Amino acid sequence: MIVRDKPNAFMLFFVVQGSVVPVIAPQILISAFVAIIVHLGYLYLPSFIPDFTVTPFVLLGVTLSIFLGFRNRASYERWWEARKQWGQLIIDTRSIARQAQTYIVDAPTGTTSQLSSGKANKYHRRIALLAVAFSHALRHHLRDTDSTDDIAPFLTELDKITIKTVQHIPNFILNLLGAEIRTALQNNLIGEISARNLEERITAMASVLAACERIHNTPLPFAYSLLLHRTAYIYCFTLPFGLVASLGVLTPFVTAVIAYTFFGLDALGEELEGPFGTSPHDLALSSMSKTIEINLLETLSEPHLPAPLLPKKYNLS
Amino acid sequence: MIVRDKPNAFMLFFVVQGSVVPVIAPQILISAFVAIIVHLGYLYLPSFIPDFTVTPFVLLGVTLSIFLGFRNRASYERWWEARKQWGQLIIDTRSIARQAQTYIVDAPTGTTSQLSSGKANKYHRRIALLAVAFSHALRHHLRDTDSTDDIAPFLTELDKITIKTVQHIPNFILNLLGAEIRTALQNNLIGEISARNLEERITAMASVLAACERIHNTPLPFAYSLLLHRTAYIYCFTLPFGLVASLGVLTPFVTAVIAYTFFGLDALGEELEGPFGTSPHDLALSSMSKTIEINLLETLSEPHLPAPLLPKKYNLS
Amino acid sequence: MIVRDKPNAFMLFFVVQGSVVPVIAPQILISAFVAIIVHLGYLYLPSFIPDFTVTPFVLLGVTLSIFLGFRNRASYERWWEARKQWGQLIIDTRSIARQAQTYIVDAPTGTTSQLSSGKANKYHRRIALLAVAFSHALRHHLRDTDSTDDIAPFLTELDKITIKTVQHIPNFILNLLGAEIRTALQNNLIGEISARNLEERITAMASVLAACERIHNTPLPFAYSLLLHRTAYIYCFTLPFGLVASLGVLTPFVTAVIAYTFFGLDALGEELEGPFGTSPHDLALSSMSKTIEINLLETLSEPHLPAPLLPKKYNLS
Amino acid sequence: MIVRDKPNAFMLFFVVQGSVVPVIAPQILISAFVAIIVHLGYLYLPSFIPDFTVTPFVLLGVTLSIFLGFRNRASYERWWEARKQWGQLIIDTRSIARQAQTYIVDAPTGTTSQLSSGKANKYHRRIALLAVAFSHALRHHLRDTDSTDDIAPFLTELDKITIKTVQHIPNFILNLLGAEIRTALQNNLIGEISARNLEERITAMASVLAACERIHNTPLPFAYSLLLHRTAYIYCFTLPFGLVASLGVLTPFVTAVIAYTFFGLDALGEELEGPFGTSPHDLALSSMSKTIEINLLETLSEPHLPAPLLPKKYNLS
Amino acid sequence: MIVRDKPNAFMLFFVVQGSVVPVIAPQILISAFVAIIVHLGYLYLPSFIPDFTVTPFVLLGVTLSIFLGFRNRASYERWWEARKQWGQLIIDTRSIARQAQTYIVDAPTGTTSQLSSGKANKYHRRIALLAVAFSHALRHHLRDTDSTDDIAPFLTELDKITIKTVQHIPNFILNLLGAEIRTALQNNLIGEISARNLEERITAMASVLAACERIHNTPLPFAYSLLLHRTAYIYCFTLPFGLVASLGVLTPFVTAVIAYTFFGLDALGEELEGPFGTSPHDLALSSMSKTIEINLLETLSEPHLPAPLLPKKYNLS
């Protein structure tokens, strides 16, 4: 995710980092090149250059804009929903750690200190660490990368062995959390009502997981993207034939500007559609799971907290 | 559902699998054919060819685009809501299986092992299998196909006999789940608060069922589709009369491109409106109910898990 | 509600049932008639026919389309929300019947059979029948018709006498349901937590009632409809003056097509705005309340179930 | 709120009550007057009349329409959300009255009659009357009027004295409701779980209060309204310069129609933005709080119910 | 936030306070300046001035409008969601104070007075003050300013020392609230069910915190803003070349009006995107946290309440 102040009007035209231009440079250049050829043809071989007039481009341009707008809205909503789900994950992990400390208590001692001693304290620690592990595991799950190294510090030795045979790691960690609540309940460290409260947090984390999987696995209908892609290509590559009669030598410049707009919006819609990747337009999952780690270790009163991630070249990964 | 990477710009024009072109090829060809006739008429019998000028098409084109955009937005929202409901089903089935293991326990033994022995274990298994059966039954219910074979492995012999007299199979399976909770409660294997928690999951599954039935049974208002269809047909079939005077021999090409866009968007809106079918644009219900089956059997520690469904020719059914 | 497959392209132009054409035929014909007069005037008395040129119609047409689009979106959302509320009613009535069977039990006998004997069974039956009565009463309430005959089979003799003095019948039935839960609680047939669960269902049914009343009683702001109506009328009736100079004899045809689109979209927006009527564009409330009746009687293991409603001439009422 | 059937096409042009025309008549007349001046200037002093051509108006008109559409959508959503909040208030007040009767019972007598005798009955009455008082107080709070007279019949003498020193009357009434629940709990007339249920209703009423305050206190960003106002004024007052060359004597008529559309939509957006006033476009708060009063008095089995409000000249206040 | 009545039509053009004009004055002036140069060039050096014709500007103008509309909608939704979250905070802080008084009671005395004596009273006060501190801390957190002075009056001496070592102050205050509930529970001043109710309020406040952090930390995708900025700049700075041939001396005026509209909408979208700042378009966080302070101190029956914030030059900060 690009994090930077808006550049001023002059610098605006020279920003490359975070722009969609590198992605669509070939298409823009080809459009401009077609326009140059068309213009030369119009000057020296006019009979070979069909004159489309500008009319079809007005008809088609409005339709294309409306539907690109519709698709970009849908893509943006996916991107923003994905961000909301991770925001929800931040709430749920913070809450499960706080609620574990509130509800799981060593009944007989009746201690009121923030750091409950004895068995309850082990549960507080275990639940918070599993929540951290879940957030790292979810990130790797959504980026199709290997989570082993990132989650190892938060698991027991037994977990690390069991996890090798597991297909769906985030779901497995949720089951581990459920098992903690069950044993706390059986050991009378928590009441039934409070246990239900913690269980609700696990269900909420399961909701985040399923919602992220939904966004990750179900792209916008392929036929839409295909139709819009095709129309955008036909539009931009034939546009010079419509403009050359009235614009002459300016045709390549105007074609390039319009191609930049249409291809740029098309490419952005496509990039936002899958918000969990590592491109500059994607969400800062690494930074957010590191934030969860810091928050929860602070709740456990850990003396040494890891540093938050900082953007590299304005890009927060 | 089509699952594939975006093809490159050149290949883009030759993709057929997943495109809407096969559906609307007749309409595009007829439009182009009309355009050829109109052009020939304009050349040889100009007095018989009315000149519509392009004005009415600009007026109507904007309106048509705005309303096609409105309808496609509504259709897409139905499609995406249907996907959300199935995502919710994945959450609810995973959660009911996990919560059954957490809450239904053989009280006296106080065992903490993942595989509770005795009666409780039978409930864990029964509830998970009924949840799998529900997801298969729902798929068949929404596709108007027969679910008998797919749900048989997850039912008892008695269920299989009773189910023959039942009209609404998914609803019947929810009633079976409710009966399990009632008997677990009466046998003191679960507390009243926890039973309510499981009951909430059943209500959530009933919500998914009713929402999917809503989308399946209530299409967009027929008169809308009719009005947009008619306007799109009149528009595309009379368009050549508006273009021929200024475009000449290019009329068929331009007509075909515009017809492709309008008929394509119209057809896509119509296909997404009913997202539970088996066309390449519909949701991958078979794959999702298989995922539920795998997840829940893994939760039951089954040794042999079925393989997930893979796309055939990029199409995940 | 019109329920039919999409007709093919040729038949499309001859479908009347479910089309909005009958509603707006007068307006279309008047527009076309005005256009014929204008054309004749243009031919024989040109000095009396003002030439508006097409410019104002482009300016106004875009604005009108955008705002018709806005209004139709709002109307559609009302229609779809109304359908969602009825879908919610289906969930809540099914759930209250299932939950009554799960939670209200004859404590001492500890029977596990589906058909609890004794007092509990009477509550199961009474609650399910009241839920059916509520759905019929709500339908009549929203259609401003008399519900007496349709709800009588589900009420006691005492209810039938009391209900004659009642102003708000659906609300009265909810109060009867609340009274059942109170007496079940006082007779120790249900626990306090479970009673709360049933009470939540009644509150959910009260939400459906209030939401439907909101949609029924609060139309879109009248001034909007008025402004859009007026603009649409002025637009379509003056359009021939703008087209006649360039289109000549084609003016009436083009005017009629554009009038069909604008008046049709305006009329459809207006019809969907109030979705509880009995026009072909309205929701199939009769069919849905019959479905609720069938579902709940099946849950009570009634031997003879009523038949579901079938569409008449593609129209499901 | 205007409540009337749609007038027929002819009457449509003469409806004043409920139209936005009276509000914007000055602007329309000024636009038309400017157009007349411009036309006269064009005829007799053409060199003093700049010719804008229609091009800038096409460019600006589309932009203005899109942004007026955006603002009207936002205003309508505020208006509709306000209506939803009041619908929610109807649900919550009805439910708190019903739930008070269900949950607050004179424990020892075990009476099952609808009219519980003794202490419990006093709570039923007090809670219902406070809920009515809240709805009247909220209406006055949102309309910045004095609620003393309207809420007096539902308060005790002590309340009436205390309320004189209170700044925020609706919030004070919610605190009174909370105090009732506390004392009922302390007198063992209600269980802890059921008390929580009633408390949830108070929280829901507090949500309605805060949401209505949000809509009332936070208008759309002022700079938006300013920008759209200014652009609409510049547009309509310079439009005659763009039209006069092609339209001649028709310029004033066309200008007036377009000014009616743009100023009308601008004015409507502004009126709907603050939906709690007493203009004909605002919500019928008086009628809705009277409905709440009638519903709750009926629940208390009051013999004499007040009459519902009726529209005056189609206007329901 | 600007709070003022709409000025009349004449004054409208001279309002500066709250307008976006000061922000975009440079761009408007540069556009107009370019237009003057182009016009002079067109008069005296016509061969050096390319004639773009107006066609590309129509093509691009519609696209730009649609996407500016899309972005402004998204920005507005962020702004309005931020306001909703603060409205939710008002509800939650009021509710936690009221619920603390309802649920935390000195069990043995059974007092029913509004001002519970003894230990419970200390909890009421502590919880309300912490809720006030949270709202001030959240404001400073979102504005990246130092909260020490504003929250000091609501904390204990111990808190003030501890807080110096804390990174995330709002989260720390929520943990303090959680600790109060834990000790109240351990001292038997509150039941388990009621404690859960208070804990839900804390979770709700944590949701507000996370949602505000989401809006604060995740701007709209940078590449969108960049693409729209660039297109708007190219559009407005080349527009004179398209208009000069037909508009002549009016070119600078028309260019300035169109530049005002496009740059204004672009700038407004950007300002609303981050709604927590202190510009006149941002939310009145200071006023709202002061309102929370007043409401909660009034609930504690404090004799001297602070005065609400008033707008300065129509600007409520």
Image (spheres, coloured by chain):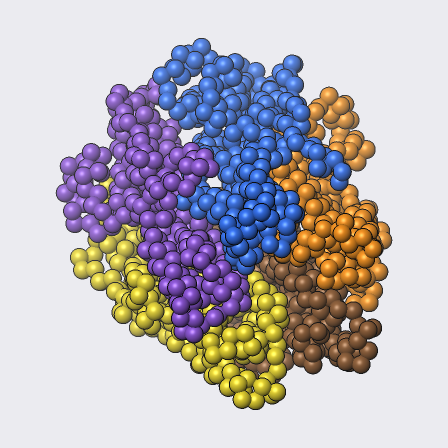
Chain colours: A orange, B blue, C purple, D yellow, E brown
- The answer to which of E283 and E172 lies nearer the viewer is E283
Q: Is residue B151 positioned above or below D307 on the image?
A: above
Displayed quadrant of residue C228: bottom left
Above or below for D87 versus B189: below
**Whether residue D188 can be seen here:** no
Q: Position of residue A156 (x, y in %)?
A: 75, 29
Q: Nearer the viewer, residue A5 or E10?
A: E10
Question: How far from the left and from the top, in percent, is residue C66?
Answer: 51, 59
- Answer whether residue D58 is visible to the viewer in this image: yes
Q: Residue at x 76, y 23 (%)?
A: A164
Q: Residue at x 74, y 48 (%)?
A: A237
Asked where in the image residue E208 lies, by quadrant, the reply is bottom right
Toward the viewer: E287 or B54?
B54
What's the residue at 66%, 39% (across, down)?
A226
Residue A268 position in % (x across, y down): 71, 49
Q: Determine whether B109 is above or below E118 in the image.
A: above
- Kindly identify the residue that appears in the image at 31 percent across and 58 percent down: D292
